[in-house]
Amino acid sequence: MKTKFNIIIVILIGLLTQSCDPSYSVSIKNNSGAEIIVDAKLTEYFDPGLTTTFIADENNRLQFKVENGHEFHCGYTIGGLKDDLPFTDLRIYIVNDTVIARNRNEVLNLFDKNWLGNLKTPYTLTVE
């Protein structure tokens, strides 16, 4: 009887703590071999965390550096990235190249994808 009760308690706890929509991190990872500069037009979903202070200009644009081998946390999304995208216009300056995404769809296309072509979670934009 006690074992049945314990199993029921574990199942109830599992059901109560399970969320319908998981939360995923959104970040930019630099594997380019050199420092990169990111220039982004921010949305209300841009949130680098409590430890980072940022000041956007009057057009809601922000520039930040990401050192080689490091990752910059840009925010979180609940469920899909399309609704909670932290930026809508993105320019990434690499030593001999520039990556430009001028709208939401172009920005989404930069994020890492799995072998089926769907976005990987957590959402990471890797610069190589």
Image: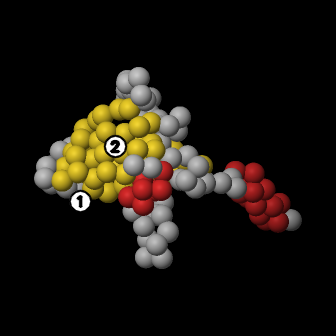
What is the x, y in percent for residue 87?
Answer: 45, 42
Which element carries disc 2, helix, strand or loop? strand
What is the x, y in percent for residue 62?
Answer: 35, 32
Q: Quadrant of the N terminus?
A: bottom right
Residue type marked 1: Glu
Residue type marked 2: Phe
Determine the CA span between mark 2 and mark 1: 15 Å
Q: In the displayed structure, would residue 41 be above or below residue 69?
A: above
The residue at the point 29 percent across, 42 percent down is 38
- Furthest-bottom residue in view? 116
The residue at the point 27 percent across, 47 percent down is 92
- Residue position for label 1: 128
Q: Is residue 73 visible?
A: no
Mark carried by residue 22: none
Q: Is residue 15 visible?
A: yes
- Residue position for label 2: 72
Label 2 Cα neighbours within 10 Å, binned few <14 / some 14-19 / many ≥20? some
Q: Quadrant of the C terminus?
A: bottom left
In the rendered structure, the answer to whether residue 37 lies left or right of residue 25 reads left
Q: Nearer the viewer, mark 2 or mark 1?
A: 1
